[in-house]
Amino acid sequence: MKLYLRVLQYIKPYWFMVILSILSSFLFAILNAFSIWMISSLISTIMNPKLNVIENSSSNLSVTEKLEQITQNLIGNGTQLDQLEKLCIILFIIFILKNIFFLLTNISLSFVGNKMIMDIRNDLFSHIQKLPLSFFHKSKSGELSSIMMNDVSNMRGAFAQSIQSLINDPITILTIFCILFITSFKMTIYVLFAFPIAAFVITKMGQSIRRKSMRSSIQIAGLMNIFQETITGIRIVKAFIMEKFEIKRFIKENKKFFHLTFMQENMRNLTVPINDLIGISLGVMLLWLGGREVLIHGNLDTDGFIRYIIYLFAMLQPAKKLGSVNSQIQAGLASAERVFNISDVKSNLKITDDLVDLLTFNNQIEFENVTFQYENSDECSLFNINVIIKKGRTLAIVGSSGAGKSTFVDLLPRFHDVSSGSILIDSIDIRKIELENLRNLMGIVSQDTLLFNDTILNNICYGQNNIDNIDFDKVNAAAEAANAMEFINKLPNQFNTIVGEKGTRLSGGQKQRIAIARALLKNPEILILDEATSALDSESERKVQSAIDNLVKDRTVIMIAHRLSTIINADNIIVIDDGKIIESGTHEYLLSQKGQYKSLYDIQFGANTK
């Protein structure tokens, strides 16, 4: 129940539309009940007129008799044909009004339901954007995609549609119930006894549907993950002739998904006949009991019995719909649980109240006794790191794979928070700097360049505050400095060329130069280069390195280097091994120390010194 109420919290902004729908639904229910009453009058009053007409002067009339008197006054005391004519006109007007209110109810509730789901999806996407990198390291992209699209869509189907039934049908049932009580209190008590049995059966079936829906959601996420991984790595799949293996793996998982969804659908399909069985059992029981009241005890007249049966079966239809809604809701709750499990993930980045607006970088960056350990890891990735980077200087980081180089640069823009120690910019702890301001000081060019399936122009301008008012001269200058114009000018649509998903229509060197142009246009004061040339061939590396030389001018640079030829002129080079700084100094100094840096240099350049 708490989960459902949490979903309904999203209705609050649209309370006016909800009130409008409730009011319209109430009027619809009143008119619907009145139309049934008038139809029953066709049988009891017109087709079988009473011998003793209720006198207007009678003062001790029951509620039923008063209603019959009102009906008699509406259709008049003319001939049966005259009464039938007036009844038809009244019914026609009632049905027009009833359907106007029905349409108004459904339109307003449809608006609220779809708005609610739109807001949930927006909130979920916004929340995911604010989560730290550690969350994405633990989560599969296919599963997140499944939750964002499939589970939220399931919620849309369940809640947007069920809200209509949860407002319309209960009001209709309650209205008809009141008339049933008025018509025969004793028989209505029998109906009330049957409700707990029906509710118990429907609840148990709903719980089973919810469990199966949860397993189905998990299974479809696994399917999406297999599909996404296979499509992303299709070159590897084909290179290693693994198409048949991937097809078998997908078919196996898809078969599991089929069995889960088949059982889930069977449970839903079973809901309808069970509801029908409960309804017809109740109807048969009341026919027997009501018939005895008429034929043996004389506590109920024939007209009242007929009217009661008509209303009872009129009530069974919305009651059955309400029973089916439960299965919809349970399936939606299973999806809602997965959605809110993501929404409830808290960022592990520490947030303080006394944030500082640091808009410029003036002096130095300092790593002070920094230690970092990933979640669920037994060992520290970095241990007791102490480094000072002066403004305008270049720090290069070298070391073997897994030594902690990328972790080092990830701590500066607060992709992760330090486990102990602190990182200071101009003597201010970065945890006290507004996160947007902190990252606005930095530009990052990584080895794995990500371009969006958009134009070259929009990819270069990505990260600009107002992309609609970009100075094209600055874009052109950034592309020129990045040595990107030589291939951009050769493209059929130049800056308006779509680069494809992840930039697949461009070569590695071309993508890297677009990324450098993006960083140049941002014009950051602090530049982070994460092995920006390691994956390129010699010719591409030469062009990209030339672009990097333009990029690093007059900036504070932190670069991770695989090829030592790119860092010879760095102001300071640190060698990281097993999370610790084991050497530090200039290129010439480190060579003279004949330590690990000298060994790496000799391996790369083929030197053989003693």
Image (tube, rainbow, N blue to C red):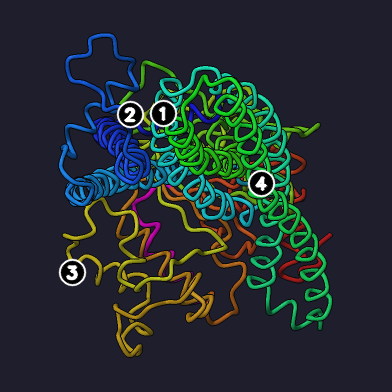
Q: Earlier in the sequence, mark 2 or mark 3?
A: 2
In the shown orientation, is residue 379 left or right of residue 98?
A: right
- Is there CB contact under 8 Å for labels 1 and 2? yes
- Which mark's residue is nearer the viewer, 2 or 3? 2
The C terminus, quarter of image: bottom right
Q: Earlier in the sequence, mark 2 or mark 4?
A: 2
Q: Earlier in the sequence, mark 4 or mark 3?
A: 4
- Judging depth in this view, the residue of 479 and 196 nearest the camera is 196
**Tag 4's secondary structure?**
helix
The N terminus, quarter of image: top right
Residue 408 showing in the rendered view = no
Most common SS among magenta residues: helix
- Which mark's residue is nearer the viewer, 2 or 4? 4
Residue type highlighted by circle 4: Thr
Tell me residue 258's x, y (percent): 75, 62
- Which mark's residue is nearer the viewer, 1 or 4? 4
In which quarter of the view is residue 332 placed? top right
Q: Earlier in the sequence, mark 3 or mark 1?
A: 1
Q: CA distance from mark 1 to mark 4?
A: 28 Å
Reading the image, the residue beneath label 3 is 473
Reading the image, the residue beneath label 2 is 12
Q: Residue at x 48, y 41 (%)?
A: 318
Reading the image, the residue beneath label 1 is 9
Residue type highlighted by circle 2: Lys
Above or below 415: residue 546: below
Magenta span: 542-556
Above or below 206: residue 434: above
Q: CA distance from mark 4 to mark 3?
A: 66 Å
Q: Residue at x 30, y 27 (%)?
A: 52
Reading the image, the residue beneath label 4 is 271
Reply yes or no: does residue 160 show up in magenta: no
Q: Residue at x 26, y 28 (%)?
A: 53
